[in-house]
Structures are given as structure tokens and as C-alpha cells.
Image (cartoon, rainbow, N blue to C red):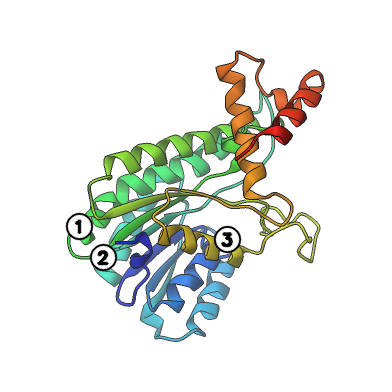
Amino acid sequence: MPAVDVFKAGSSALITGAASGIGLAVARLCRNNGMKVLLVDNNADALQSAKSELLAIGGSGADVLTSQTDVSQIESWKSLKRTAISAFGSIELLMLNAGVGARGSWGDGDYFEKIFQTNLFGVVNGINAFLPTVQEAAKSKPTSIIITGSKQGITNPPGNPAYNASKSAVKTLAEHLAWDLRDTNTSVHLLVPGWTFTGMTRGDNKEKPAGAWAPEQVADYLYKKMQDNKFYVICPDNDVSEETDKKRILWTAGDLVYERPPLTRWREEWKEESEKTMAQTNI
């Protein structure tokens, strides 16, 4: 059966980083399909605004719940699990989407700790807390786990080592989880957004730049790929096509295969060759 069957009335979703951006867009998708939703975020005001928006779609107050939660804390997940089970009885869709994009560099311990605790351990904690719950639900319904990664965790551009490393680790975790659940009724998906206009990426822009996707486009693309049972959901945007993404990934893998220096795509002495090779690569 297609993984997208998880989006159906009577099922429940728990989404972290759900008060805005991609998390909220997927929550809208859930509500439009009649699902109950538990919105998890650390921003209390944004959570209430998101709840009001989802309730406007329809349903009762019992269909949309919120939890102000620090996903980096194991104890918070224990409390969240009690809340979810008490309110909904089961969780069919678990989306681990919360993340931070702070910048820093070597020697800045707080930068590394903050990034890893939220982006990496927020995922680890979520899987450890809710995998048994999702597997129990899978005995009678389709279930799914969606984990939000990043292209920076795949092609590894210079400039933000902790963020890139956290998202690279998340990719590895998602791949292992998909393998471990390959013969079950639970599908696993690694959502890799392109340039998306969210609170994390907007900067000083008040209007969406032409090159960026809106969060709703990412949610729609995720839905489409889940119809096809795809694990890797690597989103394009209005500037970067699917073909370009694939060529960049292939070139990055070539650094290892051909024993080139790391990150050659950004090295001046490799710029001409990388651009020529990618231009000539057929996908």
C-alpha cells in the first residue's frame, strides 16, 4: 500500500517544530485529511496561533492539541508521550522536524552543543520515545515516521560544521531506521527541503524571494513522494532543479571515490572541473 495512506481520518499525528514553517504546513495537510494533530514546539505564542489556524479548517478542540516542549530533553519526551497517549490513544504519523540553524565555529562549545542537542538528539529522543507507540499502531493501520534532514547534511558546504554534521547524522539514523522497519507496516522518509521561506531562513526578508519555495510546496512534494513510497524526499526549489541536486550529490560522493580533497566543489582550483563535469553528467 502507498505510504501516503497514513493521512486519513481517525489517525493521529505528532509533529515537532510544528508552530510554523514546514512543520505547520504538514500539520495543515494532516488536518485537511481529517487527522488529529499534536503540535510540538518551544514557542508558546506561535503554538497558539498555529492551533487557531488548524481549528479554522474544522473539527473540535480535541482534534488539535499543543505542547511547548524542548525536544533536546529526554524527560520532556516522557511527558509528551503521556500527553499523546492520553489524548489520542495512538500515534500513526511521527514527524521529527524541529531544528535550529545557529552559526558558530571551532572553539565555540555552546554552538556545537545547541545544534547537536536539538537537531540530532531531538530526533534520537523522539524515535526512542515513540517508536514502540508507532509500531503498536502499525498492527492495525498504516504508520509513518518522517525525519527532516538538510542538503547541507549531504553535500556538506563549508561554513556551518555543526549544523552540517547534525544533519548528516540524522540522514544516517533515518537510513538505519528505514532498514530496521523494512518489513513492517511503518514507512520511513527522509525529508530534505530545498530553499524554503521559513522563520529559520527568511532573514530580513518580509516577502518570499522568487527562488524559494513556500512551506506548503514542501508538504505537497512530500505527499507526492509518499504516494510513490519514496524514502528520500529531496525537494527542489525555484532556483535548483532535481537534476541539479542529483549532479551535486554525485560530485560530492566523487571526492571520496576518486580521493580528491574534501569539499572540492567550493575549492577554486577545482571549480572549473566540477562545473564542467556536472554540466556533462546525464541523470
Q: In the image as oriented, which residue stretches furthest toward the left?
A: 139
Q: Do the residues labelled 3 and 1 touch (CB within 8 Å)?
A: no
Q: In this view, does 182 lie above or below 145?
A: above
Image quadrant in which the N terminus is located:
bottom left
- CA gap, disc 2 and disc 3: 26 Å
Q: Name the residue under label 3.
A: 218
Crowdedness of circle 3 by 10 Å Cα count: few (<14), some, many (20+)?
Answer: many
Q: Which amino acid does label 2 sit on?
A: Ser
Q: How many labels does the image show?
A: 3
Q: Name the residue under label 2.
A: 90
Nearer to us of marks 2 and 3 is 3
Query: What's the residue at 31%, 49% (across, down)?
Result: 129
Q: Which amino acid does label 1 sit on?
A: Glu
For this view, does 113 lie left or right of residue 105?
Answer: left
Q: Is mark 2 on a helix, strand or loop?
A: loop
The disc, 1 or 2, on the residue closer to the chain's N-terminal end is 2
- Identify which residue, 250 or 13, lies in the foreground: 250
Query: What's the residue at 54%, 38% (across, down)?
Result: 167
Q: In the image as oriented, which residue stretches furthest toward the top?
A: 259
- CA gap, disc 1 and disc 2: 8 Å
Q: Mark 1 points at which residue?
A: 136
Query: What's the residue at 17%, 60% (across, down)?
Result: 139
Residue 66 in picture, x, y percent from top left: 44, 69
Residue 119 in picture, x, y percent from top left: 52, 43
Q: Can residue 165 be seen by looking at this rendering? A: yes
Q: In this view, does 90 lie above or below 194?
A: below
Q: Is mark 3 on a helix, strand or loop?
A: helix
Q: Which amino acid does label 3 sit on?
A: Val
Residue 75 in picture, x, y percent from top left: 36, 48
- Find residue 38 and report its image quarter: bottom left
